[in-house]
Image (cartoon, grey):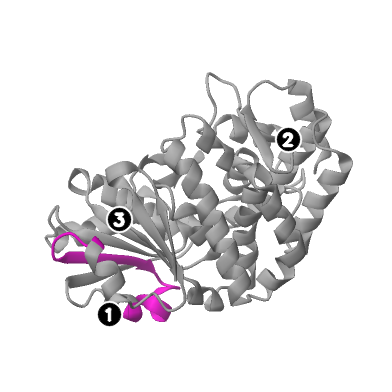
Amino acid sequence: MKTLRVELGERGYPIFIGQGLMGNAGLVAPYVKGKQVLIVTNTTVAPLYLSACEKAFESFDVKSVVLPDGEGYKTLETLNLIFDELIGQRFDRSCTLVALGGGVIGDMTGFAAACFQRGVKFIQMPTTLLSQVDSSVGGKTGVNHPLGKNMIGAFHQPECVVIDTETLNTLEDRQLSAGLAEVIKYGLIQDCAFFEWLERNIERLMRREPEALSYAIERSCQDKAEIVAKDEKEAGLRALFNLGHTFGHAIESGMGYGNWLHGEGVSAGTMQAVYLSHLLGDLTSGEVARIQALFERVHLPIKPPSVDEMDHSTFLALMAGDKKVQAGTIRLVLLKSIGQAYVTGDYPDELLQRTLMEWR
């Protein structure tokens, strides 16, 4: 087992990474406050891992709530199902929530924990690659709105993150590829050596070789933990994690939540950011080709939906509604080179327009 730490002073917490951690009672017990535990999961994960997770908390008064699966259910309406269980079962403010599932479950459980009785504790047990390397770490929680992704939420840090890499054995191939989009992102924004490692080892990850997966998860979490420790609430540096996300969120919203997976939107959105970076004179054509090739090797889309599916004006309007917009300016994460990202709202509008028209 590997142990990392997100350094946030008294609110810092460990990230445990290893095989067979799901039912480890001794690992999670120290991070439970009080006696009441509510496990929040979904209809896909519950048959696979709910029983093992319950065993880890068998010394507590543990209950569970099973939500419908999918990005389309990441809503205030679904969130109320968690509150119904908490209030109906008379949970108090010393309770602990456990997020057992992917990014949707983690985001909603964390948001419920932030809101219930003005804040209770929660534990992340991510079961998808995307949630293991990204959404379970850093304390971003929330739900979607029909007009924008993750527009309603809060920063609320978990007590710990338990990453059982064996859960990836049951992950669908499409979900694995979507998770790799976020892994590739870390190499692009600040870790050129990791990007080069991915170029050499990406097929090992696609084959789900345990050693390679464990290393990629650890490296991704380490990169994220370092930035979160410096910029918990995205005042500056943490915004680099949004590479491709303003474009990608527009794709997810425009196509209807769940039709494109988050990682698929990020992949296509990152390539739009890459193309714009090239038009600005930063990335070379060779770097563009390397990045595109890596996404293609994991079977991810490199371009957004066709104009017939989502027209140019709709795409731009959805980008303008993203939560990263400031004073009417769409702020984007772009690349100076592989491993060097920056945030800017200072780019020629005609080049953004050209990107949206040409990279389709």
- Magenta residues, start to end: 31-52
Image quadrant containing the C terminus: top right
Marks 2 and 1, how far apart at CA: 51 Å
Query: Pointer 1: what residue?
Result: 55
Residue 113 located left or right of residue 247:
left
Identify which amino acid the numbered label 1 is placed on: Lys
Image coordinates of residue 198 in percent, x first then y, are 71, 60
Identify which amino acid the numbered label 3 is placed on: Glu
Magenta span includes 48: yes
Query: Pointer 2: what residue?
Result: 312
Query: Pointer 3: what residue?
Result: 159
Q: Which residue is at a point 66% across and 32% down the rendered structure image?
A: 316
Residue 105, can we see it?
yes
Image quadrant containing the N terminus: bottom left
* Dot 2 crowding, Cα within 10 Å, few <14, some 14–19, many 20+: some
Q: Quadrant of residue 189?
A: top right
Q: Earlier in the sequence, mark 2 or mark 1?
A: 1
Disc 1, SS: helix
Q: In which quarter of the image is residue 40?
A: bottom left
Marks 3 and 2, how far apart at CA: 43 Å
Image coordinates of residue 137 in percent, x first then y, are 44, 52
133 vs 295, nearest the viewer: 133
Identify which amino acid the numbered label 2 is placed on: His
Residue 185 located left or right of residue 149:
right
Residue 100 located left or right of residue 248:
left
